[in-house]
Amino acid sequence: MQRDGINLPNLYVGLVHYPVYNKRGNIVCTAVTNLDIHDIARCAKTFGVQVGYIINPLDSQKTLVKRIIHHWTEGAGALYNPARKQALERIQVRTTLKEVIEEISEAHHTPVKTVATDARWQRRTVSYRKMHELLCDRPQPYLLVLGTGWGLAREVLEESDYILAPIEGTFTYNHLSVRSAAAVILDRLVGNRQRGGTENGFHRNN
Amino acid sequence: MQRDGINLPNLYVGLVHYPVYNKRGNIVCTAVTNLDIHDIARCAKTFGVQVGYIINPLDSQKTLVKRIIHHWTEGAGALYNPARKQALERIQVRTTLKEVIEEISEAHHTPVKTVATDARWQRRTVSYRKMHELLCDRPQPYLLVLGTGWGLAREVLEESDYILAPIEGTFTYNHLSVRSAAAVILDRLVGNRQRGGTENGFHRNN
């Protein structure tokens, strides 16, 4: 995708509420967190993500998310904070990860590549630099898959095309919120660090 | 500070609720957001920040924050989620930014350098790469100052030793939550990108 002289990756984000682990290692469906929607929407708009999908199989949860989106895109929130409207407009609600994969693949007439994330090192992980290079391979679409709760179920990791390296800080502690993880991952993959003083990022053509 | 073979910067974070702007450009005191505390605590623990200060002059707000911290460090939350306990233990509540500056300076027997953040370009901004180099200049302490609401008051920016470059994404949209901004800034300044595949970060000595 190209727009305003900038080459954009065809990047999508999916926030998965099922199947994920709870703290005991059981597969559960987590409840939606309001600020997850806002923070991922604002990150999506900032980092040029095409659509941020909130993925939850429960009708009651989907209704809640749609109500929040409506408030900020068409309700009172849209007038109160137009910047938030622009961000929330990038959010869609879907029932399953499979549905999201099919939707993106159909839109691009090619299978979307899934990029799972996990706080632990997996046997096969791809570095941020490598993933950045792959994202430059437009028009191939990519779906970054984020897990809520205690992380994505093993089956999601196994079925994904790539698994990103975990975010490492200073020591071994690695319990960032999914909101923080999403921000760091998107910045590492597609943030513009040119003027900020570090490296790569997608460059303007002109 | 050196620990476990890793050279750590003497980095502190302050989340300012007053003086900050509201959407009309008036100076206000914002209300504390629960997930700001959690996300900044988890980032602080992950990225080796010494203390995360929640700065709010209102007694009712300080009491609320202390109650949240107590729940997770000594109350039922500490047993429920020990990882959260480790994170929340890094959080302190203070009345003013001045008080925080004096406290850190006294502890280190040298004036702390303040590093303000803003979503807009300022006349004097320091790049992430430059700030990373400065942070390597141990044992000099640094305080990263984050604003809630619509950003830090002009006086805080003017009185700061440094102003970090804004986080740039793909276009000009720059309305990240303070939670997302904190995560990205800490990752850019002190995140370990070695195994993650990109550059610099603080290295192990051995």
Image: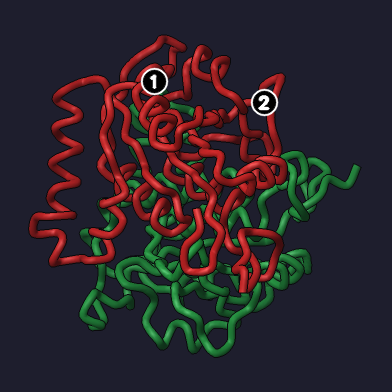
Chain colours: A red, B green
Mark 2 and mark 1 lie on one chain; the one further toward the N terminus is 1
Whole-number angstrom distance, CA of label 2 to CA of label 1: 24 Å
Q: In which image quadrant can residue A74 be found?
A: bottom left
Classed neighbour count for the residue bearing mark 2: other residues with Cα under 10 Å, few (<14), some (14–19), many (≥20) = few
Assign the N terminus of chain B to one quadrant of the image.
Answer: bottom right
Q: Which residue is mark 2?
A: A121
In the shown orientation, is residue B70 left or right of residue A159? left
Q: Residue at x 81, y 49 (%)?
A: B203
Furthest residue in direction left, as rendered:
A76
* Residue B135 badge: none
| Subunit that carries the residue with mark 2 | A
Q: In which image quadrant can residue A178 be found?
A: top left
Furthest residue in direction top, as rendered:
A26
Q: Which residue is mark 1?
A: A98
**Up-down relation of residue B169 to residue B134 (above or below):** above
Residue A115 coordinates in the image, percent (x, y): 55, 31
